[in-house]
Amino acid sequence: MVFQDMVVIFDLDGTLVDSAPDLANAMNHVLALEGHPPLPLEKVRGLVGNGARALLERGFAEYDPAGIAEEEMQRHIGRFIDWYVDHIADESRPFPGCESMLDALAANGAALAVCTNKTEKLGFALLDATGLTDRFDTIICRDTLATYKPAPEPLLECVNRTGRGRGVMIGDTMTDLSAALSAGMPCLIASFGYGRFTDEQKKKAGWFDAFDALPGLLSNL
């Protein structure tokens, strides 16, 4: 297995790192300030994807389907980020086999990138706290460029920055798959992640159940 011409692009939440416990705690902190009971962790896992705002919108929709006014939502986002940045890795950990998989890909010549819809403030904080930052050749967050996933530009920029001939997206949600399809690159989805897919959507990606399978799948692309 040699990946000299490839950059492997990873989503962060639900792909590299099981961050749902701390995201749930942050959201439940904000919900509690508004008098709402906490949402269970397994519920929150299905709400993660496309950044803090989307998570809060989905969380508050459990109690207020009519939606939240923009000014009020901005206040909620501020409270969420203030709490979350101080507790970003209380319980969040890389998924089993993550580090050894990254080592194997790098040893076989792959460039490694992160493309996340976390802001740079939160994305780098989580990567630093979990000891993953230095493993990646480039890291692109929600506010690094003018656009973010599911737009294709962040994935294409990972290819450009690493100087590789092709990219592969590794993710866990439809946001990741849509970005890969728009960028014209293959996508492999972690079955242990947070995303929910229809049967038709599932046909558009490859799937893996554990990180030790990933190098083999990449070599067959």
Image (cartoon, grey):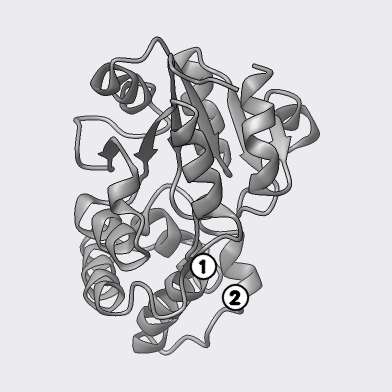
Amino acid at dot 2: Leu
Mark 2 → mark 1, Cα distance in angstroms: 7 Å
Q: Give coordinates of residue 95: x percent, y percent.
A: 57, 60
Q: Give coordinates of residue 211: x percent, y percent.
A: 64, 47
On screen, 129 above or below 207? Answer: below
Q: Secondary structure at mark 2?
A: helix
Q: Nearer the viewer, residue 157 or 44?
A: 157
**What number is the disc on residue 56?**
none
On screen, 184 above or below 143? Answer: above
The residue carrying pointer 2 sits among few (fewer than 14), some (14 to 19) or many (20 or more) residues within 10 Å by Cα, namely: some
Q: Give coordinates of residue 15: x percent, y percent.
A: 53, 50
Describe residue 117's horizontal placement relative to residue 63 as left or right. left
Say which label, 2 or 1, has the lower sequence index: 1
Discs 2, 1 touching: Cβ within 8 Å = yes
Q: Can you name the residue that lies furthest to the right here?
A: 199
Determine the residue positioned at 46% across, 55% down.
13
Q: Nearer the viewer, residue 129 or 206?
A: 129
Q: Circle 2 is placed at which residue position?
A: 41
The residue carrying pointer 1 sits among few (fewer than 14), some (14 to 19) or many (20 or more) residues within 10 Å by Cα, namely: many
Determine the residue positioned at 40% across, 80% down.
90
Amino acid at dot 1: Ala
Q: Circle 1 is placed at which residue position?
A: 20
Q: Give coordinates of residue 55: x percent, y percent.
A: 44, 60
To which quarter of the image does residue 81 belong? bottom left
Which quadrant of the figure contains the C terminus? Answer: top right
Determine the residue positioned at 43% across, 33% down.
9
Describe residue 155's horizontal placement relative to residue 39 as left or right. left
Determine the residue positioned at 28% across, 43% down.
141
To which quarter of the image does residue 124 belong? bottom left
Which quadrant of the figure contains the N terminus? Answer: top right
